[in-house]
Image (tube, rainbow, N blue to C red):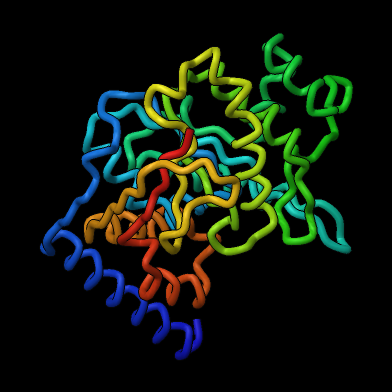
C-alpha cells in the first residue's frame, strides 16, 4: 500500500469514527408521528447500498417502531461492458446487501434481490410463474441477471411491477417505501423502480390492503408533492443515529463500493440524517 493510500485509509477511518461517535452521542429529533407501528414494511430499491445511501433515516425510524422490515433490491449489482457480464460483482454485492440487512435486524429471507427469483425458479412454482411474466423461463439457466446495473440499462416499469408484486405476495407488506418521481439522484434505474412500484401498487392493494397504512412512502428532496397529483401528508424524519448506521453499513458491509466520492456523499448528504416522505394514496 502506498503512502497516499495509507493516509487516505487512515483519514476515512478517523472521519468515520468521529461521525459514528457523534451519531451515538448527539440528540435525536423525530418528526415522525405518522409512521406506522407493528406493520410489515417493504423497502424497494434499485442497487445494493441504496439502503445506506438514501434510506437510513427511514429504516432506523421504522425499526424503532417495532415494524417488520424487508428489502427488495431489483439489481444484484451485475453489470455489463465490452468484456461481457460481470456476475462476480453481483455475487459480491448481494452478500454485502445481506450484511447491511443484518445491521437493521432484517433476516436473510426478507432481504431479496431480483436475482433471488432466479435462484427460486427451479423449486418454487410461484417464482416460476413470476419469472415467466418477466420474460424469463426455467430453460434460460444462463440468464445473468433480471435487472442489470447501469445508467444505460432501461428497466421497463411493467417488469419492475411484476417483480414487486411477486415479492409483496411472498413476504407480505402493509406499506411500501421507494424512491420519488425523480429517483432522488435522477438515476434511470431509480426512476424505473419508482414507476414500477407505483404501477404495482394498484395491483397488490386488493390482496394486501396497503391502503390502510399508506403505501409508497416516498423520500423527496423538497416539499412539492408528487407529479401525479396523489397528495398525502409530508413527513420529516431526522436523526443523527441514522447517519451512524449509514456509515457503519458502508464501512462494514459495502466494501466493494468504498470510493472517495461515496465518503464525501456520506459526509455532506442530507439523506444520511434526513428523509422527507410523502404519504400517497
Q: Residue furthest front?
A: 229
Q: Residue furthest top?
A: 125
| Residue in view at x 73 percent, y 43 percent | 147
Asked if residue 115 can be seen in this view, the reply is no
* Residue 222 in the figure: left or right of residue 201: left
* Residue 2 in the figure: left or right of residue 151: left
Asked where in the image residue 70 lies, by quadrant, the reply is top left
Q: Position of residue 167 (x, y in %)?
A: 58, 24
| Up/down of 213 relative to 189, above or below | above
Q: Position of residue 93 (x, y in %)?
A: 58, 49
* Residue 204 in the figure: left or right of residue 105: right
Asked if residue 6 can be seen in this view, the reply is yes
Asked where in the image residue 104 lies, by quadrant, the reply is top left
| Up/down of 4 relative to 250, above or below | below
| Residue in view at x 11 percent, y 61 percent | 27
**Residue in the foreground of this view, choosing between 73 and 209:** 209
| Residue in view at x 48 percent, y 70 percent | 262
Total label count?
Answer: 0
Q: Position of residue 272 (x, y in %)?
A: 36, 62
**Residue in the foreground of this view, choosing between 205 and 40:** 205
**Residue in the foreground of this view, choosing between 128 and 91:** 128
**Residue in the foreground of this view, choosing between 80 and 213:** 213
Q: Position of residue 74 (x, y in %)?
A: 63, 40
* Residue 223 in the figure: left or right of residue 260: left
Asked where in the image residue 223 lies, by quadrant, the reply is bottom left
Q: Residue furthest bottom?
A: 3
Amino acid at each position: 500500500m502506498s503512502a497516499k493510500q495509507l493516509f487516505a485509509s487512515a483519514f476515512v477511518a478517523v472521519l468515520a469514527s468521529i461521525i459514528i461517535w457523534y451519531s451515538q452521542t448527539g440528540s435525536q429529533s423525530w418528526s415522525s408521528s405518522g409512521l406506522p407501528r407493528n406493520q410489515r414494511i417493504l423497502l424497494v430499491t434499485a442497487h445494493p447500498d441504496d439502503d445506506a445511501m438514501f434510506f437510513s433515516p427511514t429504516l432506523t425510524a421504522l425499526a424503532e417502531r417495532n415494524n417488520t422490515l424487508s428489502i427488495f433490491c431489483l439489481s444484484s449489482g451485475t453489470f455489463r461492458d465490452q468484456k461481457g457480464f460481470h456476475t462476480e460483482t453481483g455475487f459480491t454485492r448481494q452478500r454485502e446487501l445481506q450484511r447491511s440487512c443484518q445491521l437493521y435486524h432484517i433476516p436473510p429471507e426478507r432481504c431479496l434481490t431480483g436475482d433471488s427469483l432466479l435462484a427460486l425458479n427451479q423449486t418454487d412454482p410461484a417464482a416460476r410463474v413470476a419469472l415467466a411474466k418477466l420474460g424469463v423461463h426455467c430453460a434460460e439457466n444462463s440468464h445473468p441477471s433480471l435487472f442489470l446495473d447501469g445508467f444505460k440499462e432501461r428497466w421497463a416499469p411493467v417488469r419492475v411491477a411484476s417483480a414487486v408484486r411477486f415479492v409483496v405476495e411472498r413476504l407480505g407488506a402493509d406499506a411500501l417505501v421507494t424512491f420519488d418521481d425523480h429517483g432522488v439522484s435522477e438515476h434511470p434505474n431509480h426512476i424505473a423502480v419508482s414507476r414500477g412500484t407505483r404501477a404495482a401498487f394498484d395491483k397488490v392493494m386488493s390482496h394486501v390492503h396497503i391502503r390502510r397504512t399508506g403505501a409508497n412512502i416516498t423520500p423527496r428532496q423538497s416539499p412539492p408533492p408528487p407529479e401525479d397529483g396523489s397528495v398525502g401528508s409530508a413527513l420529516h424524519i431526522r436523526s443523527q443515529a441514522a447517519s451512524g448506521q449509514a456509515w457503519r453499513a458502508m464501512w462494514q458491509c459495502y466494501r466493494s463500493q468504498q470510493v472517495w466520492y461515496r465518503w464525501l456523499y456520506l459526509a455532506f448528504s442530507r439523506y444520511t440524517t434526513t428523509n422527507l416522505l410523502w404519504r400517497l394514496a
